[in-house]
Amino acid sequence: MTLTLLVQSVLAGLTNGFVYGLIGLGIAVVFRGARIINAMQGDLALIGSVVAYLIAVSLGLPMILGFLLGVVAGGVTGFLVDRLMIRPTAKRRGTEDSFLLVTLGGAFAVSATVLLYFGRDSYVLPGIGGNAMVDVFDAAMRVHAIWLIVISTGVVLALRWFYAKTAIGQAMLAASIDPEGALTLGINVGWMRTMTLALGGLVGGLAGVLVAPLINIQYEMGLLLTLKGFAAAILGGLTSPFGAIFGGVILGLVEALAVVTISSGYKDVVAMTLLIAIMIAMPQGLFGRRGRLGG
Amino acid sequence: MLRAGLGTLALAGATIMSPMAQAQGATGEPLKIGAIISLTGPGAGLGNPQRQGMLLAEKTINAAGGVNGRPIRILIEDDGSKPDIAKSKAERLMYDEKVSAIIGPSLTASTGAVAAITNAEGLPTLCFTGLGPRIELTYKSLFHLLPAQDLNAKAMLEYSTKELKAKKIGILHDTGYGQVVTNQLNVHRQAYGVEFVAIEKFEVGASDVSAQAAKVRAASPDVVFVIATSAVPFRNARQVKIEQPIVSAIGSSTYDYVRGFGEYADNIIYPEFVVGEQPKDNQKAFVEAFQKEYGSLPKNFEAAAWDSVHIIAKAAAKAGPKAGSKDLAAAMRGSYPGVMATYDFAKDDMTGIELSSYVFSKLVKGKFERLSFTTK
Amino acid sequence: MTVSPDTQRARAWTWAITAAGLVVWAALPWFLSRGTIDILVFAGLYTIAGLGVSFLLGQCGIVSLAQSGFYGIGAYAAAYGTTALGLPIPVGIIAGMVVSGAIAAAVGIPVLRLSGHFLALATLALAIIAHVLFLELEWLTGGTLGIGGIPRIALFGFTFSTPFRFYYLVWPCAFALILFYTLLLNSRTGIALRAMRDAPAAAAVAGIPITSLKVRIFVLSAAVGSLAGSLFAHYVSFISVDSFAIDRAISFLLIAVLGGVRSIPGTIAGALFVTAAPNYLSRLGDIHPILFAVALIVAVIFLPGGFGGFVSSTWRRLTAGPRPSATGGP
């Protein structure tokens, strides 16, 4: 194996890893604040990227506007998911499985709607820095991928600050960890859940506008992203934003290294076996101390 | 827009109309044809062009008097890209709707499930897939409108060895369509005297395959085959600086995919059948009619769908109004000069497409250009 | 043991309704079109596979997304056994169940120690691994092209070749399994399972072998999934890897939850929804997948206990007579 190949696989693994991690980040945010596995997280990214495409490419407006509105579209969808799906389910005392399934239904709906109204094409969203590449030991990496890594890291830090330092962030955590206690403190628990879903939506929309330039926008991308993002979030302990990114990077690197050292056909077998092994060896996840609370 | 094209269309469909019916259009008892295609799910990119081709053919034939005065009616069902649903739809179309023939499915797996029951009744089935598992060779009423992957593989190797003089080839393929073509490439590798220096695969829907692409590049091939039904591997191949010509297979030769390639849609060669921008003489009327109807250029799947309806119409005219499904299937067994390719359904592989039916196109800055290369 | 008049009345009704249901079931194919019977056959196949998932989830709290893998193993065992090895049909089916059970035991022992979402992800990982292996082991599975020409099941010279005939094979299998699972639920094992589910710590103290019990139920579920897969292969006579992907695992979970995981016969309703809804909605045009998704969302929101839970709560209200029910009503 040449150095170039090794470097290229590490770069590919990092890129994929941050893609998985960004989706996992949204899943972790929603789980942390609402104790719900949001199976729509990948489809929120789909919505974000479609909106960004319609504004920046179809209408030809500035990219930054498409980018921002894509993120906002994710947040608005997250808000609507809470109002139209999560809240009515909670009202009728839905179980943990009900929340998973109702968001899964939402994922199907988003994907089918995109197919019907946006089409079956795969669309290219321009990235930050266009298609410019940087060379690392003769291996190549998109400039956009570096931006993706930088922005994801920034978002993780911002979330950490948000939960630790702001009143609303702390209220959101309190509402999720101890809903009854939070009520006595005068926290509106239902509203906090709505905020959590909207925040998860914003992260999902951001993931969409960041990921789409790398993988093309396509109606089926949501569920695939959700599956990998779920794995990333769980590896990170399910409640930790930093853990989700870290879990995603581990998964991406394992996959990429499996390709160059073992066989591309068995890449998923290697990655999934390792995933199971990690969960058994470290049942708290790599970063979560409260990981098991999900069960 | 819908009415505008009828004049030309009537001419295009003139081969199977009776002079009497020409004036007033078809009236008698309709000839029911079932169609099972993938309009939703992963195969939606196949089913939608196929529907356009079929509907245009239906309209053209009916405007020209139908089949001996009988209009054609195509009942289109969506299998959602799932073989189980395709099977249920086939049961419904065959036994509840009593169709005379089935067009489709769009996907290999659905074809296998549908063919197993249409074969039992000898109902003619014109699928948009190449030859599937070996058992299909015994299904004498299953006709393939697309070439066996064996032939696609040969066409790729023809161009690579004869035009590009390649000795070392690297392959980047997905685990669905790409796997099937790659298996056939392996069969013919020796006959063409080439070496496969790297064969790398990735799952359908993968988001980044640069690690695989880098491995292909590291093997320094003369030509790279990218065989997949997504735009990602094409982009990644160029991004990791694979600068060699890319030869691909017909499955990704659609405008949808090419749009997804973005600025990387360059120096990619397709062995295929229809280049709408520069059609062959026998394709011109169809391409014109299609453009008039839909405002876009057709490609291979649209043409195959157009041919499928015409093949049934021709066979039905030949077999007569009293013909059962077995007679209709028998009437199809013969050669048919289609728009996409010249078929010969009497051949053992139930398609009879020859290597000489292929045209070769090259993507140059996002546009298909027909190449002068032929296999003859 | 004293039995209250209410309970007695409820039991009599249960028997009467079951008997009436069986008569309707037996008569149904004579009045339906072939396309509809075909859908009912698939509902039967999915009921069988869904039962395994439902019981695991409802009684052990184990979310299994691995069922598509076992369904696939059953299908490939049947296909490979009959077409490549020329074995008798029952040998292929039993081999599939044994292999599935053995694999379930081997992976279940480490994996079932996990819980909650970790366990769900682990089973999802197993399904992904199974799908990759089905693709890669082409000599066995035919890869993407699949295996065709799988023989139909024949008993005493009678071939289950049409949907009409297969209906009378698949549904008795499903009913037998419903009966089996119901008896299991009411047995000592069932009591142990409920204790384990509702009060794991107490169950452990009471000496219930938790892991071994979970593994045994998982093995049973795998064998049942494998049976469904084998029957599917012999019914369609063609299989390919597309039938055993993650979307199938998700639909089995949908069947279990929509049917109501605490209700064993509810699985039938879940399976009917998942098989019939896409088929009939697709007549409404290209919008049908959206309608299916909306129907799914509405069903989950309004029936938190699934179809089975809805029926049993309505049932309790009706049989409880004029007295206000303690459990019913929001």
Image (cartoon, grey):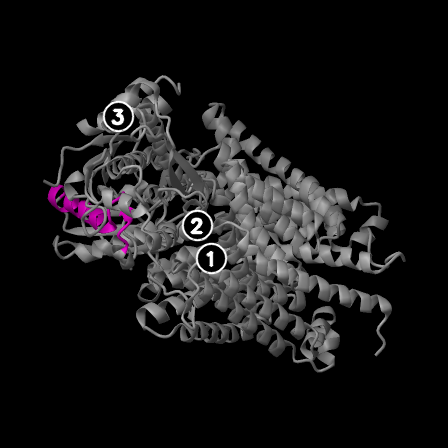
Residue C154 in sight in this render: yes
Amino acid on which the number 2 mark rests in the picture: Glu
User: Residue A191 occupies which quadrant of the picture?
Assistant: top right
Q: Is residue B34 above or below residue B148?
A: above
Left or right, residue C312 beside residue C273: right
Q: Which residue is under mark 1?
A: C163
Q: Please say if the residues under marks 2 and 1 sit with CB atoms less than 8 Å apart.
A: yes
Amino acid on which the number 1 mark rests in the picture: Pro
Q: Which residue is under mark 3?
A: B18
Label 3 element class? loop
Alpha-carbon span between mark 1 and mark 3? 41 Å
Q: Earlier in the sequence, mark 3 or mark 2?
A: 3
Label 1 element class? helix
**Residue C210 x, y percent position in the rendering:** 65, 77
Left or right, residue A244 beside residue B220: right
Front label number (3 vs 2): 3
Q: Which residue is under mark 2?
A: B91
Q: Residues within 10 Å of mark 1 (few under 14, many from 20)?
A: many
Q: Please say if the residues under marks 3 and 2 sit with CB atoms less than 8 Å apart.
A: no
Quadrant assignment for the N terminus of chain A:
bottom left
Alpha-carbon span between mark 3 and mark 2? 33 Å
Q: Nearer the viewer, residue A284 or A70?
A: A70
**Residue C135 x, y percent position in the rendering:** 37, 60
Q: What segment carries the magenta color?
A: B139-164
The answer for which chain carries disc 3 is B
Q: Is residue B270 above or below residue C136?
A: above
Amino acid on which the number 3 mark rests in the picture: Ser
